[in-house]
Image: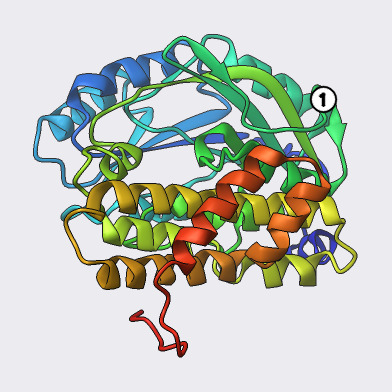
Amino acid sequence: MGPGEYRKQQGLRADVTRTGGLWLSILIPVYNVEPYLRACIASITSQMDWEGAEIILLEDGSTDGSLALCRALVEEHDGRITLLRSAGNGGLSKARNRMLDVARGDYVWFVDSDDEMRPGALAQLRGIVDACAPDVVLCDYRKRGRVYASFIGEAGRLATDNEALVRGVFESRRMHVWTKIARRSLWGADLRFPNGQLFEDMAVVPRLFARAETYYYAPTPWIDYRVRPGSVTAQLSRTRDYFDEQGNDDLCHALEGYAAALLKTIPDVHPSTLYAVANFCAKEFTKIVYRLLRARLFHDNWTTNHALLDRYYRGMEGCSPIAFPDLVREHVRRRRFGRWALLTLCLGIHRLGAPRHGRACRS
């Protein structure tokens, strides 16, 4: 279903609701972030228009003092912050899905509870929404003092090329949902974060963008991203002899089925878009290869390691609209020799010691 068909089916309007409702819901999952939560909330409330926006916290079974702090923050803001609770730790996806079901704003913005919103971000967002009412607004972020772009493409104006939106997020490789503010109605009842899986942002952002007809990219950092030891990225690469098999499995399958859906949504999709999606999948495969070999090369026999390599090869190539051997040739044609060399090396490692008779590896 293309973006136009989805909008028609859902009865989406081109403008923001002007019936006195909320224009924005800021959704913040909370789990063991007591040292950072107050600063996060203060960075938002200091620029809040309480008449048109809401903050929803979901405390997800923390074992530190996060729940008590959430209650204190609600009281300090005269009950204007909504606090939800989970009976136990249900995970990030479940928390976000529940907040989506409760949110009332025309737009939703997921903010991580250990990050901070930069001054002026809400005013800039409101200005864009009032002027253009785009389906999606994208912003940049700052990490350790450096600004990172979350999108590659047209900036500073309303854009209507849905395919360019999809291509630009794959080219930037920034799938995190906290730099994307989207109409709540775009989510629908059929698009939610996958429960119990890591890389949940990667699983939903491309599919969410496939439904958008308009977007606005503000090339300005609106979020200060905090690097924490407990992050997913840190877990995947925290030690030289550790390989998170479950985490890499989730990464491997986050985009499962997306290539076919993309071709159905945009039947005449441009080759550059297919290349961007394929390169993203191949890059993730090469990262998995590096992590696996670094952790297990001298700890497990090659048969075991190759079975894992083959599993991830099949998974990541299965998400790609271009077979990896064909992508190698496309890298050469486009003169992307760094990409060519890295993918060629990883494919060679995968072929090394492959079963002679095509014996299936475990899955």
Residue at x 77% of width, y 54% of height: 330
Residue at x 19% of width, y 62% of height: 300
Q: Answer yes or no: is residue 21 visible.
A: no
Amino acid of disc 1: Ala
Residue at x 46% of width, y 9% of height: 145
- From this view, report whether residue 231 is shown above or below residue 332: above
Q: Position of residue 275 (x, y in %)?
A: 75, 53
Q: Position of residue 41 (x, y in %)?
A: 36, 21
Coloring scheme used: rainbow
Relative to the observer, which residue lies in front, 237 or 89?
A: 237
Number of marks present in the image shown: 1
Q: Position of residue 123 (x, y in %)?
A: 63, 15
Give the quarter of the figure containing the N terminus.
bottom right
Q: Quadrant of residue 318?
A: bottom right
Q: Is disc 1 surrounded by few (<14), some (14 to 19) or many (20+) residues within 10 Å?
A: few
SS for dot 1: helix
Relative to the observer, which residue lies in front, 327 or 303?
A: 303
Q: Quadrant of residue 135?
A: top right
Q: Is residue 243 left or right of residue 282?
A: left
Q: Which residue, as the protein is rendered here, is positioned at the far right?
A: 268
- From this view, report whether residue 87 is shown above or below residue 233: below
Q: Is residue 343 left or right of residue 291?
A: right
- From this view, report whether residue 205 is shown above or below residue 122: below
Residue picked out by circle 1:
131
Q: Is residue 293 left or right of residue 125?
A: left
Q: Position of residue 237 (x, y in %)?
A: 30, 40
